[in-house]
């Protein structure tokens, strides 16, 4: 089951990245499927609330399953929050949309597959990976040409997940 979910995550990330490169559009149902494949491994883990509250007897009630799931997934949204925090001032300064809603949604969905700190590392690594391409566009005198960001987010999510020493060393 875990292999199937991993393959689904990779396939959806490739589809979304390709569409972002070709059309600069992100389709909602593709993000929904990507989210499904990233959330399901965590949702299928049994008894997550054991990680949040130790068994002290009947004096401390156990967390409901849905609340323990929400508390476990919430820190994964750090990268999306960082992108959103950068997108709003960038739009005010430049007068155009630099980071789209699709980028933020993809970062949120990809963050579900990572640890709490991994989500922010994913976004920082994506900016670092996009730097040579944006410099090339600047040197080629095409600074207004949009640069699709989801492929960099997808690659950085893969690197943070599968090559963790790279992101820990880098950040």
Image: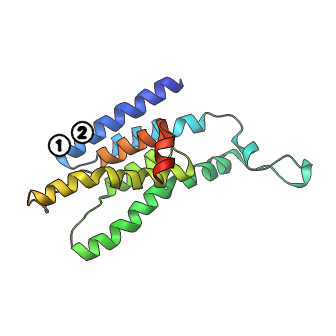
Query: Residue drawn at (45%, 56%), measured in percent from left and top?
Result: 79
Residue 22 bears which disc, if any? 1
Q: Is residue 145 visible?
A: no
Q: Is residue 134 left or right of residue 44?
A: left
Residue closest to the far bottom: 93
Q: How many marks?
A: 2
Determine whether, in the image, residue 147 is placed left or right of residue 108.
Answer: left
145, above or below 51, in the image: below
Q: Secondary structure at mark 1?
A: helix
Residue farthest to the left? Answer: 141
Q: Is residue 63 left or right of residue 87?
A: right
Classify residue 12 by image quadrant. top left
Is residue 161 among what the camera can see?
Answer: yes
Q: Which residue is mark 2?
A: 18
Of the pair 28 and 39, the residue shown nearer to us: 39
Please provide percent x and percent y for residue 29: 35, 42
Residue found at x 20% / y 57%: 135
Q: Is residue 158 above or below residue 95?
A: above
Is residue 103 rendered to the left or right of residue 36? left
User: How far across and down, in percent of the image, does residue 60 sit?
Assistant: 86, 54
Label 2: few (<14), some or many (≥20) within 10 Å?
some
> Foreground: 121 or 76?
121
How far across and down, in percent of the image, does residue 108 sit?
44, 51
**Circle number at residue 118:** none
Dots 2, 1 in contact, CB < 8 A = yes
Q: Residue at x 26, y 76 (%)?
A: 93
């Amino acid at each position: 089951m875990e292999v199937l979910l991993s393959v689904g995550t990779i396939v959806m990330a490739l589809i979304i990245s390709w569409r972002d490169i070709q059309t600069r559009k992100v389709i909602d149902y593709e993000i929904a499927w990507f989210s499904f494949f990233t959330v399901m491994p965590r949702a299928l883990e049994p008894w997550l609330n054991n990680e949040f509250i130790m068994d002290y007897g009947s004096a401390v009630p156990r967390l409901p399953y849905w609340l323990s799931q929400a508390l476990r997934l919430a820190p994964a949204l750090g990268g999306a929050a960082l992108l959103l925090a950068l997108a709003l001032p960038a739009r005010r300064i430049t007068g155009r949309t630099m980071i789209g809603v699709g980028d933020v949604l993809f970062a949120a969905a990809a963050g579900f597959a990572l640890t709490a700190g991994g989500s922010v590392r994913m976004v920082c690594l994506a900016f670092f990976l996009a730097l040579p391409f944006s410099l090339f566009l600047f040197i080629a005198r095409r600074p207004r040409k949009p640069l699709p960001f989801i492929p960099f987010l997808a690659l950085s999510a893969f690197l943070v997940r599968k090559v963790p020493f790279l992101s820990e060393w880098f950040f």
